[in-house]
Image (spheres, rainbow, N blue to C red):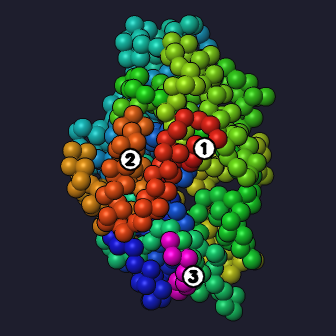
Amino acid sequence: MERDIARLAAPVYDVVVVGGGILGACIAWDAALRGLQVALLERGDFGAATSANSLRIVHGGLRYLARGDFRRMRESIRERSALLRIAPTLVEPLPVLVPTEELGTRSRAAFRAVLGLNDLLSLDRNRGLTPERRLPAGHLISLEECRRRFPAFPSEGASGGAVWYDARLRHPEGLALAFVRAAVEQGAAAANYCRAHGPSISDGAVTGVTATDVLSGEEFSVRARRVVVAAGPWTPGLTRNPPAADDPSALPQAFALNVEIPGQRTDVAVGIRSRSGRRDDPIGGGNRYIFIVPGESTTLLGTWYAPWPGGDPEPLIGRGAAALVEEFRAACPGLVISSGDILRCHWGLLPLKAGRESGRPDALAAQERVIDHGAGVGPAGMFSAEGVKFTTARGVAQRVVDRVVTSLGLPRTRCRTVEVRIDDLGDTSKAPPEALLRRALREEMAVRLSDLMFRRTTFGLPFAAAPLTVAAVARIAAADLGWSPAREAAEIDDVMRQLRPPGPTVGPGG
């Protein structure tokens, strides 16, 4: 997988995908697997920004059960199974534990009914999965067992716990990259650090996109019969006429923040009710579940939401990190944490309902948006896709590619992305560090030190990323990529800035 700008500028592609987050990567993979000629552009690195900064839970949609939204629940169950099947080294089963109470809708009797119905609606959840990836049935456990699984379990008012099984993303950035790599192996052309400016239009139809190579500053064109914009918060700006590519605030967005603390505090994901009301939690609506999620050697806490004002994120990062710690101190006193324990902040932007769907305008969007702009007032051949969660990105991509194939007048071929394995490199966790770095630099399009530390490897785990470690990785990258001493120093400064505790210099995960 090489970064070849000249190749992007040469042929006429069937479709160019703008945005290399999880949704754009899935679209490129699906389209390439169906035999389309595909180009993929990403303004930063693949799988960075919001795609990298989730709580790493692949939800099976249990929350939709309470709302009676069985369609979305079944979709989430199918997509969770698909990820466990096609990426078994990157997605693994995860038990989730929440407290039960004596009476009411959170009683053991109520949860027993909910878990039973959840199991009934997901009878096919293990179809095609190997034994170690299969999800057991949900069940109730005693208060003593809750404390054994999670010593800091908030037992005040609790009668025990309810356990069900979802899945955990071991490395979200690695999963996004696996989709990109799979697309390239099927013939797609892809390049990171290429900023698209918007579609090229002739006679009311798209003819491709114009873009700038961020690394060289050179502008180039990618010719294509169809354009799909899947650029997260930049999507509305890129589909405007004229485009506003640098405006991530074309529609209201939510700022979402998770924090990482040292040590694996639990072997299950634990959901507890926040004590904050609607006034302090306008996006979430108050009194919602916040989660403690085990990582490989750290623990994630999330999520804190706030309206995104645009501009500099630094004030929100510091405020949000402090607020999230206080949320957990109040709801789970036994966790014993302070702001000084935070190793790293992860943040991203998520769409709001904003009048585009029913419900509070300032609530998180619940429905993905796939638009054929040629069917309205936009140019023919341009589509846009905005997802709402990591779990369903593959399924949204399938629907997007279906529409692209139909618009091209091609026969609808069967989508195979639910069955073709993408993590074909296997589990690389025990590979020698030097080998991982060489492969990332020469075969995985790593061109920045942050690409190496955070997305091609896990060397950037805060507890391990001492200045000496960062400097050693930078020396290898500098020798391979021909960096000057000044460039090497700047790359080290950038990575160390991202690894500092919350404050005015913490960044969006690479």
- Marks counted in the figure total 3
Residues shaded magenta: 215-224
Instruction: Indicate the amino acid at tag 2.
Output: Val
Residue that carries the numbered disc 1 in the rendered image: 505
The quadrant in which the N terminus is found is: bottom left
Q: Is residue 219 left or right of residue 204?
A: left
Q: Residues within 10 Å of mark 2 (few under 14, many from 20)?
A: many
Report if residue 218 lies within the magenta region.
yes
Q: Residues within 10 Å of mark 3 (few under 14, many from 20)?
A: some
The x and y percentages for residue 383 are 61, 72
The x and y percentages for residue 463 are 39, 34
Q: Which of 410 and 273 is in front in this view?
A: 273
Q: What element carries label 1?
A: loop
Residue that carries the numbered disc 2 in the rendered image: 470
The x and y percentages for residue 54 are 51, 43
Q: In this view, does 430 lie to the left or right of 368?
A: left
